[in-house]
């Protein structure tokens, strides 16, 4: 028998009011790709942080190459050969990609040497890096790629991937899988966290299932169906949400000749965007990450201003109206970056909900300059209950929630406003399968009630499930909108390459 590279023996970690991990044991061998699966809040990320050294276990042992290691922090674990690609990125937004990578390199490493090494690794694994771009100008998918390259530069013996494909386009996911398989063939052990069960079936050898912080099963992935994995994760059958017909009304949001001026070389320039969304309709935006989706949503929510007539709500020109004014018109926004942009990590859930109400069409939580604390607490608790957010209550800070639970809270908070227009980017990023189904259903119900919804996602299957029509963005340009049933893989591939005018059946000539 091959000796385990990593072994955990009855590891436990508790926080006030929460048992994150309880007597967890597992083994990982060189060359093994092991999935760690479970619902949001099952303890997956806490366990991985304990392995990486950023969380100190309360009990248990961690063995590396058969030797017990004492807790001294991430630096020791990196020296041993443990790398981690985090779900929430640890990048400095005001620095360039190269500068962020340089900070993770050994002291004294020259910038040019780092540039050469980063370029070599990214080329080897088919990852495109904008080394001179500032991180603040990158999409979530592009930031994820930076994290992956930064991790691989240390030539690790074990790599932990925490939801690495949540916001990656299909070509990047396929390239990442090839990277992981190559690492495993070279003897590197992989711990892989994902809520996408199809990915786990495709990539992983074994799966350890966590529920409520405990190990409830270990399975051979090749011998286990996706539905069986889902039931093991949740302890129950998945819910069914039948799709019903919706009534589409008048145009609520229209965009006409929207063009942008870039503020940095890393930004995508929007070129003559034109589309409209009707009441009761869900319009999906597909495309490779960094094709202009982020810039589009910033112009629609009011973070960026444009000419007055470029954006209209109910026929009213609002292109030069800011965030507060657009909230007053009934626009709600769920951004792709949930930490800092979607929620402030050091504030409580109640405080985050209160901040998001500024400028909303109805203010239910203040009177004569005073906060209605009881009403605010009641609404926060209602969101927590309705969306099954696992946390310590309304006073819990956003930073204490798992990524998936924070996403559920942000979605519930915005849907609770009963908006006229919902803008949502990556609606189910990092969310478990049952919660993903619930969130999609709630967004569809919002549209069924008469709201206009614009949703951007890297997951084309998600768009096909949720949307009535789909557009594709490529290099700041937008394709025509087509009904969901008219979108197929050939059309999607052409349009993602920016070939909007090429007739179907002609793709072979461009290969």
Image (cartoon, rainbow, N blue to C red):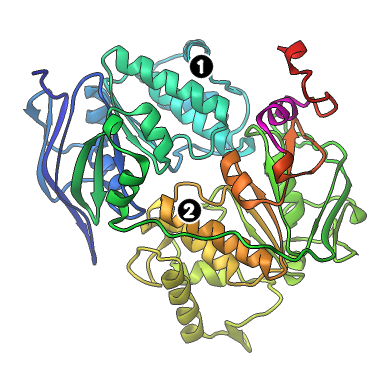
Q: Quadrant of the C terminus?
A: top right
Q: Position of residue 136 (x, y in %)?
A: 60, 39
* The magenta segment: 487-498
Asked if residue 381 is positioned above or below residue 431 in the image, the reply reads below
Q: Nearer the viewer, mark 1 or mark 2?
A: 2
Q: Secondary structure at mark 1?
A: helix
Q: Position of residue 110 (x, y in %)?
A: 46, 14
Return the residue at label 2: 436
- Residue 142 falls left or right of residue 298: left
Return the residue at label 1: 122
- Residue 202 falls left or right of residue 29: right
Asked if residue 68 is positioned above or below residue 387 in the image, the reply reads above
Please name the predominant secondary structure of the magenta segment in the image.
Answer: helix
- Residue 305 falls left or right of residue 470: right
The residue under the point 71% across, 37% down is: 487
Query: Is residue 456 covered in magenta?
Result: no
Distance, label 1 to label 2, CA atoms, is 32 Å
């Amino acid at each position: 028998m091959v000796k385990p590279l990593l072994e955990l023996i009855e590891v436990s970690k508790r926080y006030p009011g929460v048992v994150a991990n309880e007597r967890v044991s597992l083994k990982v061998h060189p060359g093994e790709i092991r999935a760690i699966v479970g619902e949001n809040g099952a303890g997956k990320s806490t366990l991985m942080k304990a392995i990486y050294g950023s969380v100190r276990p309360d009990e248990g042992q961690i063995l590396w190459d058969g030797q017990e290691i004492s807790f001294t922090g991430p630096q020791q674990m990196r020296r041993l050969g443990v790398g981690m690609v985090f779900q929430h990125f640890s990048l400095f937004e005001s620095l360039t990609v190269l500068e962020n990578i340089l900070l993770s390199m050994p002291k004294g490493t020259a910038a040019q040497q780092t540039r050469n090494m980063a370029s070599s690794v990214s080329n080897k694994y088919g990852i495109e890096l904008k080394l001179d771009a500032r991180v603040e100008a990158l999409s979530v998918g592009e930031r994820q790629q930076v994290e992956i390259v930064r991790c691989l530069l240390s030539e690790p013996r074990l790599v932990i991937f925490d939801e690495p494909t949540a916001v990656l386009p299909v070509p990047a996911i396929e390239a990442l899988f090839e990277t992981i398989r190559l690492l495993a063939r070279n003897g590197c052990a992989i711990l892989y966290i994902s809520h996408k069960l199809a990915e786990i079936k495709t990539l992983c050898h074994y799966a350890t299932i966590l529920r409520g912080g405990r190990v409830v099963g270990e399975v051979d992935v090749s011998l286990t169906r996706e539905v069986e994995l889902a039931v093991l994760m949740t302890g129950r059958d998945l819910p069914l949400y039948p799709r019903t017909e919706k009534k589409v009304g008048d145009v609520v949001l229209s965009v006409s000749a929207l063009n942008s001026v870039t503020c940095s070389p890393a930004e995508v320039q929007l070129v003559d965007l034109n589309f409209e969304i009707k009441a009761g309709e869900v319009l999906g935006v597909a495309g490779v990450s960094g094709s202009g989706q982020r810039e589009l949503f910033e112009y629609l929510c009011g973070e960026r201003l444009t000419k007055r007539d470029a954006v209209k709500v109910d026929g009213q020109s609002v292109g030069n109206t800011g965030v507060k004014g657009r909230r007053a018109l009934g626009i709600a926004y769920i951004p792709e970056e949930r930490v800092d942009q979607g929620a402030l990590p050091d504030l409580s859930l109640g405080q985050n909900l209160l901040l998001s109400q500024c400028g909303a069409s109805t203010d239910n939580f203040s009177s004569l300059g005073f906060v209605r604390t009881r009403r605010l607490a009641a609404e926060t608790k209602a969101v927590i209950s309705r969306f099954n957010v696992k946390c310590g209550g309304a006073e819990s800070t956003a930073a204490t929630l798992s990524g998936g639970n924070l996403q559920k809270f942000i979605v519930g908070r915005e849907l609770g406003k009963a908006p006229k227009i919902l803008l949502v980017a990556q609606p189910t990023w990092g969310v478990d399968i049952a919660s993903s189904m619930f969130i999609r259903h709630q967004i569809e119900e919002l549209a069924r009630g008469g709201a206009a919804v614009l949703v951007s996602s890297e997951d084309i299957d998600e768009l096909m499930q949720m949307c009535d029509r789909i557009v594709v963005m490529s290099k700041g340009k937008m394709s025509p909108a087509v009904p969901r049933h008219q979108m197929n893989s050939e059309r999607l591939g052409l349009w993602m390459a920016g070939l909007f005018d090429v007739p179907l059946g002609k793709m072979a000539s461009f290969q």
